[in-house]
Image (tube, helix red, strand yellow):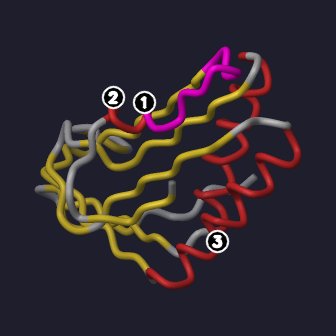
Amino acid sequence: MIEITQEDFSVDEIIKSLQTPSAGAVVTFVGIVRNESKGRAIEKIEIEVYREMALKQLESIRDEAIKQFGVENVAIIHRFGTLKTSERIMMIAVAAKHRSEAFQACRYVIENIKKRVPIWKKEITVEGDFWVEEMKL
C-alpha cells in the first residue's frame, strides 16, 4: 500500500492490511506534527508534493526495502496540505517474519523518503514561515 492523501489515516487498518500468518512482526513509524522546531513555536505546517514523481519514488523505495531486507510487505502513507500540531503526517509499516529485518527496513524507508521523495514541508510560526531542508544521509 502506497498512498499520498490529504485525509487522516487509520493506524489500525494499515497494520491489519499487512498482517499475514507468516509475519511475526509489524514495525511502524508514525510521523506527527510537533509544536516546536529549532526553538520556534510551530502553529501548523504546509506540505506540498509532486504527486506523480513522489508515487514512483515511494514505490521504488518500498521495492528496494522488500528486496534488501527480505521483508514481506511495506505500507507508506504520506499526507499533504495544511496540518496542525499533533496531527499525523505519515506512516510507514513493515511486515516481516522477524523484528530485526522489519526495524531495518522501516529505518531504510524513512531515511530514503526524507532524501529522495519530492515532498516539501513549510513550518508556519509566529516568527514567520520556514521551509524545512531535506535530510542529509
Q: Which residue is mark 3?
A: 57
Is residue 3 on the magenta stretch?
Answer: no
Amino acid, disc 1: Lys
Which residue lies under the disc numbered 1? 16
State if disc 3 and disc 1 touch (CB < 8 Å).
no
Residue 97's spot in the image, x, y percent? 75, 21
- Marks 2/3: CA–CA distance: 25 Å
| Residue 101 shown left or right of residue 15 in the figure | right
Q: Vertical placement of 26 versus 114: above or below? A: above
Residue 74, percent across and down?
Answer: 62, 44
Label 3 Cα neighbours within 10 Å, binned few <14 / some 14-19 / many ≥20: some
Q: Nearer the viewer, mark 2 or mark 3?
A: 2
Q: In the rendered structure, which disc, 1 or 3, sits on the residue that comes first in sequence?
A: 1
Residue type highlighted by circle 3 = Gln
Mark 1 and mark 3: Cα distance apart in space: 24 Å
For the stretch drawn in magenta, the main secondary structure is loop
Q: Which residue is mark 2?
A: 12
Q: Residue at x 19, y 61 (%)?
A: 124
* Secondary structure type for disc 1: helix
